């Protein structure tokens, strides 16, 4: 009897720990221009990431591609058209990952490496080139993300980030 109680407690702790590793809307901060009319937005162009800055020098080309893909897929799932040409876009999407200086890097090269920081996603008006919407998400990026769990995490992060876009629309 006593052993089964401890087992239930252990399982409950494991489940709670697993839940804390998942993205949620509470981890996302959103700010936007309340005077901007988002109702016309149908097409979005994802802007190239400037890879020669201090903010992006720790990201690999593969990580950039995976983040772009997760954001693109979530926008499309939400009914937006992602266009290649800026001239066809109602808004530009740009993003930046700012890493924390205390990111974890393992000594053993066989372990997965993590980069911890904040992912900022911006929606920019293409006419006035001003930010109209921004979400920030505190994230952990793996250098070795070729697992189904990592792909699921990217999908969930993109969904959490874009859950409040456009403002007032609901998910």
Image: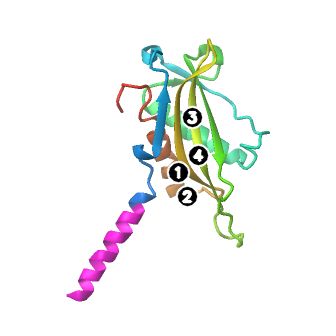
According to the picture, the residue beneath numbered tag 4 turns out to be 118
According to the picture, the residue beneath numbered tag 3 turns out to be 121
Decide which of 97, 146 is in the foreground and name it.
Answer: 97
Please identify the residue farthest to the bottom as the structure is shown: 2
User: Going from the N terminus, do you reach mark 3 or mark 1 first?
Assistant: 3
Going 62% across and 11% down the picture, which residue do you hit? 127
Going 20% across and 87% down the picture, which residue do you hit? 1
Residue extent of the magenta highlight: 1-18
Circle 4 — which element? strand
User: Going from the N terminus, do you reach mark 2 or mark 3 first?
Assistant: 3
Whether residues under marks 4 and 2 lie with C-beta atoms below 8 angstroms apart, the answer is no
User: Going from the N terminus, do you reach mark 1 or mark 4 first?
Assistant: 4
CA separation in Å, label 1 and label 2: 6 Å
User: Going from the N terminus, do you reach mark 4 or mark 2 first?
Assistant: 4
Whether residues under marks 2 and 3 lie with C-beta atoms below 8 angstroms apart, the answer is no
Other-residue count near label 3 (Cα within 10 Å), few / some / many at <14 / 14–19 / ≥20: many
CA separation in Å, label 3 and label 1: 19 Å
According to the picture, the residue beneath numbered tag 1 turns out to be 151
Q: Nearer the viewer, mark 1 or mark 4?
A: 4
The image quarter containing residue 104 is bottom right
Whether residues under marks 1 and 2 lie with C-beta atoms below 8 angstroms apart, the answer is yes
According to the picture, the residue beneath numbered tag 2 turns out to be 147
Circle 2 — which element? loop
Query: Viewed as shown, does residue 52 lie left or right of 154?
Result: right
Residue 118: x and y in percent read 59, 46
CA separation in Å, label 2 and label 3: 24 Å
Query: Viewed as shown, does residue 8 lie left or right of 111?
Result: left
CA separation in Å, label 1 and label 4: 18 Å
Question: Which label belongs to residue 70?
Answer: none
Q: Nearer the viewer, mark 3 or mark 1?
A: 3
Whether residues under marks 1 and 4 lie with C-beta atoms below 8 angstroms apart, the answer is no
């Amino acid at each position: 009897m006593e052993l089964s109680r401890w087992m239930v407690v252990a399982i409950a702790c494991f489940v709670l720990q697993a839940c804390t590793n998942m993205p949620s809307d509470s981890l996302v901060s959103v700010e936007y221009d309340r005077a901007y009319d988002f109702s016309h937005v149908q097409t979005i162009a994802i802007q190239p990431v400037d890879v020669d800055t201090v903010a992006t020098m720790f990201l690999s080309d593969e990580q950039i591609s995976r983040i772009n893909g997760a954001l693109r897929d979530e926008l499309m799932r939400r009914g937006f058209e992602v266009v290649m040409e800026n001239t066809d876009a109602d808004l530009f999407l740009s993003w930046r990952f700012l890493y924390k200086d205390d990111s974890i890097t393992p000594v053993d090269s066989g372990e997965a490496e993590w980069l911890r920081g904040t992912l900022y996603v911006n929606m920019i008006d293409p006419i006035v080139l001003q930010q109209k919407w921004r979400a920030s998400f505190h994230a952990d990026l793996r250098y070795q993300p070729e697992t189904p769990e990592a792909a699921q995490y990217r999908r969930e992060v993109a969904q959490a980030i874009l859950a409040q876009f456009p403002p007032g629309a609901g998910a």
